[in-house]
Image (spheres, helix red, strand yellow):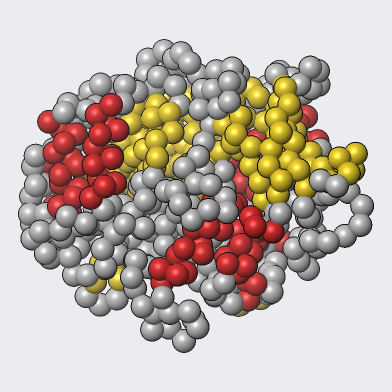
Amino acid sequence: MAQADPTTGRPHGRRALLRGTAAAGAALSLPLLGAAAPAQARRGRPSADWGVQAGDVTAFSGLVWVRSDRRARMLVETSATETFRNPRRWHGPLVGPKTDFTGRTALHGLPAGEQIHYRVTLADPDDPRRTSEPVYGTFRTAPHRRRDVRFLWSGDLAGQGWGINPDRGGYPLFAEMRGLNPDFFLNSGDTIYADSPIQERVELPDGGVWRNVTTEEKSKVAETLAEFRANFRYNLLDRKLRDFNAQVPWIVQWDDHEVLNNWYPGEILDDDRYTVKDVSTLAARSLRAFSEYFPVSTLRPGNDDGRVHRVVRHGPLLDVFVLDMRAYRNANSPGRQPDDTQGILGERQLEWLKRELSRSRATWKVIASDMPLGLVVPDGKTDYEAVAQGDPGAPLGRELQIAELLRHIKHRRITGTVWFTTDVHYTCAQRYDPDRAAFKDFAPFWEFVSGPMNAGGFAALELDGTFGPDQKFVKAPTRANTPPTEGGQYFGQVDIDGSTGELTVRLREEGGAVLFTKVLQPGRVGQ
């Protein structure tokens, strides 16, 4: 019998799921130390040492990802059971150097609300009899009817030089999250730190030493497409992450460190570490690698088109609105301009978001934001990186777009909006209240912040009073860049009750502690 989760009473897992993951683990052994990328040309059969991953799973569809060690045809089989009796077969793409040997296969016509077992095989295109060992994964499709939903969220992985540490067993948070058996994981950005080299040894404040697994490409900032690709591969050297990927589908977005700290389109660098100074060029290379290493429904590997912002629908209780606060923003500035139509979302994305929120019939509308709304995030001495800019008065600068969005939500009587984010390297919860705000034409709502998963911790930031945030909880270190050995690694858990529609948010810390809990009622304004 599956063991119950003490926080909710929900079973942790399933016999078939654990067997499938164990089978996957047998095929996923990469050395932790001296971890260079698998060779791209070798004799024998193709190999899928980087594991499998699923993404953007809905009630009837999903994407399955794999990476080969050479040119190969991707083949996927799906089944209702781990025995793979009478499997359904899917012929995927021919993967090769154009996409860094990554590929994905779209699965359609899946049964809603069911556990899907899948296995990926790579076939030699010149001799289809020569195939890899299968790599196994599983995911649960979204329900067609009301049913309990659980998801987790966090962000910020391998930041500030804190990488895969074999003394900690790699990335321990992924094993902890995997044990909670979520329907999906929302990665809120900073999936890599392309601007943060990983050294073999880092001196700790207590006199100890942090050891890192590292690679040649991670010894410098990423500039070339190959170096960005290697940043995404770096995290996959961790066994716990690969095991997590084989069990839990992702909804993923990006933020700044996929390119470099606090970047914006059109920026020209004054940084001696970079020979490429045009940030838009770096961003294009990063987005291409991002599209190759994550199964995102609105991006196509090997192509320069597509977008990160999208809606992922998860049954009648939940729609997830994934934002991109990076690619369409204006330049970071003091943020005091009285007219700002571009803002942090761009005009077209803002109109898209208003339109899709109005169309949504889900009980809960999760707004997955890669940056917080009311926390004052500085960029140097005079500029600001996020929405807030420290002036508690009427909306100015990027705040104008958020004011327009919040006004739209109120006047269209859109209920059930909840904001989830990461970015600031601590965890907190705040309720935005028009009675406390300079701008009052909106309905109260909550914003929850979590992360990092494996990065430095940072002190809490000031709150901007424009939208009236009332911080109900915060846990943060008192100094900058505290190592993960001192704690401060966070993720959030969200449970939606299928019968009552209640949404419960838990802010959690590595090690199992639940730090804060908030229960929200469906359809209620002002809670």
Snapshot quadrant of residue 269: bottom left
**In front of the other: 187 or 63:** 63
Q: Is residue 156 visible?
A: no
Q: Is residue 525 visible?
A: yes
- The residue lying at 46 percent from left, 63 percent from top is 284
Query: Whole-percent x and y of residue 367?
Result: 34, 39
Q: Is residue 135 above or below residue 11?
A: below
**In front of the other: 415 or 397:** 397
Extreme residue in the front direction: 126
Quadrant of the image containing the N terminus: top right
**Could you tell whether 15 is left or right of 478 in the image?**
right
- The residue lying at 37 percent from left, 68 percent from top is 263
Snapshot quadrant of residue 135: top right
Snapshot quadrant of residue 412: top left
- The residue lying at 31 percent from left, 36 percent from top is 418
Query: Whole-percent x and y of residue 279?
Result: 41, 72
Q: Is residue 201 above or below residue 477?
A: below
Query: Whole-percent x and y of residue 88?
Result: 72, 22
**In front of the other: 190 or 348:** 348
**In front of the other: 24 or 290:** 290
Query: Whole-percent x and y of residue 333?
Result: 22, 70
**Could you tell whether 42 is left or right of 238 in the image?**
right
**Could you tell whether 115 is left or right of 119 in the image?**
left
Quadrant of the image containing the C terminus: top left
Number of labels in the image equals 0
